[in-house]
């Protein structure tokens, strides 16, 4: 048998296109050819199991062999093989028809990436690295002749009969000059390890079996113990601490999906934990860059998702718009929420103990996904300074009595730094206010989400105002100062501080509070933080946004007003102002040294 022919494509040559557009990821040729070999082997096993093939199944390993002298890579299987006719059908016509369609659509369209994503080039990806490919194959069917197909990367092919006596297929790649890197033993092993680690048929390379053929996600949860999950986790992420818990995913309708997702113990640096999920399609590795494919908040989770419904050879932008991918995302979101809700309901104590870590997933989920917020709003917790944890509803009830302002808004007061904000915390505690701790890396964003979602609630940092004004209950303390005295004390402070732009306020506060307090209104602080985040000038942009509040009812205020020596007056005012700066953490450098020297002078 000998036959020559021309692959009928309407375009001159699609190979340059294959080379050009798949350029960024040449490694996948090996994934494609090895998974074809696996498919062919599984098909044979299937036929044998249903009695359609009655011969010996025997050895089923897929072998990858590198010949550094001949510059070839050979992928061999003992699968169903092909007859000459089948090669023409499956390799020449069908595979090419996909590629042809691709070329057709590609004409006149700028965004080639959009298009290429829709067509798996499968077998033909071999031409990214080879300038000649041979298929030597013999069908499992009795009385068929072995065939050899050769193609040099043009639309011309050649089929001849071949010597092969054993069932199966050898794909021989004559690696081209630009792809020499693939002729390195180690490089090839690296790629195989990446893509073939969990293939269902044994893959042999350089004398070793490279894969685990039944990874845990393919098994039934009832056949697995905790230690199996932990072992698998270690095999995926050798350097990581044990995870907190995991979810075994298993759906077959309306799409097919299996996998195991782990909740790692997250330390403060979130970025370290991001982007670790691996995506598989029938145990063939696709990618571990799942950004934009899985929901944003899952980025913190680890593990494996396997779905034949996630198309293999497709571009990122295509995946994002794929309706299966969307359904899968919704499903996973629901699963994760369900798991967390179950933990909360079954063992609230245990849940609270792990809140430090779990909280990150819950908060991250809530702020990046509306649906997740709605599902999980009953299990988000707030921690107060006594270390007590409340659900949102519980907390709002807890503070309703003492922390509702005159307009009926409940005011949540928080600290994000107990050490630095201690003076303000103490002042608020004196008013019996409850204070929540928000010191997690993502709390800043989370606060915004909470404010949006919780009705008639405002959230203020404890140093956003003097304790008296944190919650405006519409009841002002009577001032002991006359209007004249107020004006006078303001002037004294202005000249003591030496800043013309500064306009101190005088407020009637209780006598036990500080004589002077420096605060930054919540709104201003958030603006500043936003500016800083965006790399703008930050604090510098709002130079005099801080509020300086003089406590009109403090004995020191009376003392200053009663003092006849102007220098003395200013000295006391300056000292009181510096103390306010000090408890705000703002007294530094030369000003701090001057303050210390002045204080030493005062006590000696
Ligand atoms: P796909 O795998 O998506 O069908 P490919 O381009 O990878 O597309 O392969 C095209 C066809 O060629 C396969 O469907 C199969 O019929 C045939 N084929 C490829 N490799 C082998 C092989 N190793 N053994 C038997 N048939 C093969
Ligand atoms: Mg294929």
Image (tube, rainbow, N blue to C red):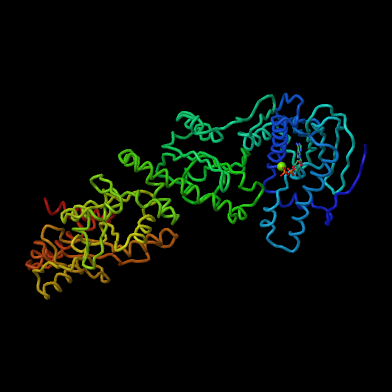
- On screen, residue 132 above or below 104: above
Q: Is residue 386 left or right of residue 94?
A: left
So how many labels did they put on this image? 0
Task: Tell me the quarter of the picture where residue 78 sits.
Answer: top right
Specify the farthest residue to the right.
2
For the question of whether residue 539 can be seen, the reply is no
Specify the farthest residue to the front.
51
Q: Is residue 57 left or right of residue 512?
A: right
Where does the image place residue 412, in percent across and percent down from the top left?
27, 57
User: Which is nearer the eye, 370 or 263?
Assistant: 370
Q: Residue at x 15, y 74 (%)?
A: 487
Q: Is residue 536 left or right of residue 283?
A: left
User: Which is nearer the eye, 75 or 219?
Assistant: 219
User: Which is nearer the eye, 37 or 516?
Assistant: 37
- On screen, residue 91 above or below 572: above
Task: Tell me the quarter of the picture where residue 163 sits.
Answer: top right
Where does the image place residue 571, in percent across and percent down from the top left?
15, 62
For the question of whether residue 571 can be seen, the reply is yes
Q: Residue at x 18, y 68 (%)?
A: 474
Specify the farthest residue to the bottom.
484
Task: Tell me the quarter of the picture where residue 211 sits.
Answer: top right
Where does the image place residue 359, in percent across and percent down from the top left?
37, 46
Where does the image place residue 250, in percent across and percent down from the top left?
52, 40
Quick check: which quadrant has ligand 2? top right
Quadrant that contains the N terminus: top right
């Amino acid at each position: 048998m000998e036959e020559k022919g021309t692959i009928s494509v309407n375009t001159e040559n699609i190979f340059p296109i294959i080379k050009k557009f798949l350029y960024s990821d040449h490694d996948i040729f090996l994934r494609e050819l090895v998974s074809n070999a696996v498919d062919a082997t599984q098909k044979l096993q299937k036929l044998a199991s249903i009695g359609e093939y009655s011969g010996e199944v025997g050895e089923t390993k897929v072998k990858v062999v590198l010949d550094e002298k001949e510059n070839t890579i050979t992928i061999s299987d003992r699968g169903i093989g092909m007859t000459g006719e089948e090669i023409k059908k499956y390799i020449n016509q069908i595979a090419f028809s996909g590629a042809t369609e691709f070329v057709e659509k590609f004409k006149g369209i700028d965004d080639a990436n959009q298009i290429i994503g829709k067509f798996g080039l499968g077998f033909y990806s071999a031409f990214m690295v080879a300038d000649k490919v041979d298929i030597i194959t013999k069908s499992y069917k009795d009385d068929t002749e072995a065939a050899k197909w050769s193609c040099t990367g043009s639309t011309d092919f050649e089929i001849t009969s071949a010597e092969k006596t054993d069932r199966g297929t050898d794909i021989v790649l004559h690696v081209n000059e630009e792809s020499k890197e693939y002729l390195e033993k180690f490089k090839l092993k690296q790629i195989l390890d990446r893509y073939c680690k969990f293939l269902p048929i044994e893959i042999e390379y350089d004398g070793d079996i490279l894969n685990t053929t039944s990874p845990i996600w393919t098994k039934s949860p009832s056949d697995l113990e905790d230690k199996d999950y932990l072992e698998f986790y270690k095999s995926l992420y050798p350097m990581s601490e044990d995870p907190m818990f995991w979810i075994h995913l298993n759906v077959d309708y309306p799409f097919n999906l299996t996998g195991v997702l782990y909740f790692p113990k997250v330390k403060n640096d979130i970025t370290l934990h991001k982007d670790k999920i691996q995506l598989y399609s029938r145990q063939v590795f696709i990618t571990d860059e799942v950004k934009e494919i899985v929901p944003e908040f899952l980025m913190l989770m680890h593990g494996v998702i396997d779905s034949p419904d996630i198309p293999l050879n497709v571009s990122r932008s295509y995946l994002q718009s794929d309706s299966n991918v969307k359904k899968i995302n919704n499903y996973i979101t629901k699963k994760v929420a369900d798991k967390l809700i179950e933990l909360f309901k079954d063992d609230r104590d245990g849940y609270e103990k792990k809140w430090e870590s779990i909280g990150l997933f819950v908060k991250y989920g809530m702020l990046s996904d509306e649906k997740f917020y709605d599902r999980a709003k009953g299990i988000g917790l707030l921690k107060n300074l006594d270390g007590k944890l409340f659900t949102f509803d519980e907390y709002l009830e807890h503070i309703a009595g003492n922390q509702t302002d005159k307009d009926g808004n409940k005011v949540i007061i928080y600290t994000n730094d107990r050490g630095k904000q201690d003076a303000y915390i103490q002042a608020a505690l004196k008013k019996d206010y409850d204070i929540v701790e928000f010191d997690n890396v993502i709390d800043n964003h989370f606060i915004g989400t909470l404010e949006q979602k919780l009705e008639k609630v405002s959230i203020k940092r404890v140093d956003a105002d003097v304790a008296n004004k944190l919650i405006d209950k519409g009841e002002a303390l009577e001032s002991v100062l006359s209007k004249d005295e107020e004006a006078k004390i303001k002037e004294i402070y202005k000249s003591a501080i030496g800043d013309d732009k500064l306009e101190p306020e005088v407020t009637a506060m209780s006598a036990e509070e500080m004589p002077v307090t420096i605060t930054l209104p919540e709104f201003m602080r958030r603006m500043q933080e936003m500016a800083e985040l965006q790399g703008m000038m930050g604090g510098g942009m709002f130079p005099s946004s801080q509020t300086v509040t003089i406590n009109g009812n403090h004995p020191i205020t009376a003392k200053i007003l009663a003092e006849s020596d102007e220098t003395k007056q200013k000295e006391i005012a300056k000292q009181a102002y510096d103390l306010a700066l000090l408890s705000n953490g703002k007294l530094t450098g030369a000003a701090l040294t001057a303050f210390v020297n002045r204080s030493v002078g005062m006590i000696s």
